[in-house]
Amino acid sequence: MYIFIVNPEAGKGRSRRIFSRIKKHTLYQEIESSYYYTKYVGHAEEIAQRITKREDIVVTSIIVIGGDGTMHEVMNGIKNRNIPVSFIPGGSGNDFARGSAIKGNALEILQQIINAQNGHPYWLGNFKIDNRKKRFFINSLGFGFDAQVARMASKSKLKGFFDRFHIGTVNYIIALLKVLLTFKPIDLELEVNGKKRTITKCWMVTIANHPYYGGGMKIIPGAKIQPAVFPVLVLHSISKWKVLALFLSVFNGKHINFKEIELMNATHLKIISNEQLYYQVDGQTGTCQTSEISKQSDEIRIFGKAVRKAGA
Ligand SMILES: Nc1ncnc2c1ncn2[C@@H]1O[C@H](COP(=O)(O)OP(=O)(O)OP(=O)(O)O)[C@@H](O)[C@H]1O
């Protein structure tokens, strides 16, 4: 049985429209399925948790229709990692779909999900904020400047307007300029695989499971879907003008050539700050003083990746 979890609000109603179209199609009518609409923040996580505990049904796949925030909740709710998860992007950013090569319109993706034999493996990131419970991230986790920009962009009154016209990037750039005016770099302690380092006047630290971030920017272009190891990007002390140039080049991934960017691989990372530090995880923001990051070694199967035709 397929279980659909639909966030009707994601993408300003796009996910609801996608699911309405799917429900009318024979592809949907011919499969055994049931569906749930999420009603509030955290509901997708609760639904996923309940489903994976049920022993009276065999779940072929949980199919998420929503944005990255809904997928983040579902991955955190799943207790039985043997249940494959599928994603039909209906949000405004949809970086998980980009990173997992899920392409095509909703019905094409549904067809790929139904055809999937084993799907493809994916490894989630683990993170702990201050002394809270360990959670998973699906795309990326960022501290400092980018998190502050993400927070400003999500609070913008014009976000809905830009998202409706698929120009969310404009909203992001406006937020970036606003944060740039007041941002103060932070002194941080990083512990990478057990080795401590002090980073003075740090602008940001970002960890990614795949390259995409902020609705299509390639924050760590070389990030691979892989177990146990994750890339870490550190933006060291830099002038404000140069940050502007650097962020404009994030769209084509050329920012990694700036000398202020350091890239490393880690299996464990600890971040300690004396001041409150902004963070973003899969697009949701908050503040913290410490964080611990690692990567899952156990895979989760994802259904719906576009399969390349021979010779294509
Ligand atoms: N019925 C609901 N009403 C309001 N918010 C909801 C509802 N159901 C889920 N949510 C919340 O909506 C938030 C945003 O969802 P999601 O991230 O999937 O969409 P998006 O922001 O449009 O897409 P993206 O993250 O890809 O940009 C999530 O934090 C989720 O908890």
Image: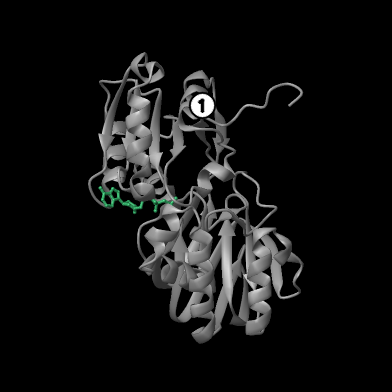
Percent x, y for residue 44?
30, 43
Instruction: Work out whether residue 167 can be spotted.
Output: yes
From the top left corner, tell me how far across and down residue 151 is, in percent.
Answer: 42, 69
Instruction: Tell me if 132 is positioned left or right of 294 in this view.
Output: left
Dot 1 lies on which element? helix
Q: Is mark 1 within 8 Å of ligand 1?
A: no
Query: In this rendering, would 219 be left or right of 139?
Result: right
Taking depth in this image into account, of 268 and 302 the one nearest to the observer is: 302
The answer to whether residue 50 is visible is no
Q: Position of residue 240 (x, y in %)?
A: 62, 83
Count of marks placed on residues: 1
Q: Residue at x 77, y 67 (%)?
A: 257
Q: Which residue is mark 1?
A: 108
Farthest residue to the left: give it. Answer: 39
- Front residue of 44/155: it is 155
Residue 284: name its quadrant.
Answer: bottom left
> With 38 as the anchor, is 306 left or right in this view?
right
Identity of the residue drawn at 68% across and 23% down: 309
Few, some or many C-alpha atoms within 10 Å of disc 1 (few <14, some 14-19, many ≥20)?
Answer: some
Q: Residue at x 60, y 49 (%)?
A: 210
> What is the x, y in percent for residue 96?
51, 45
- Image quadrant containing the N terminus: top left
| Quadrant housing the C terminus | top right
Residue type highlighted by circle 1? Glu
Answer above or below: position of 307 versus 171. above
Q: How is the image coloured?
A: one colour
Eyeballing the image, is 264 above or below 306?
A: below
* Residue 34 position by quadrant: top left
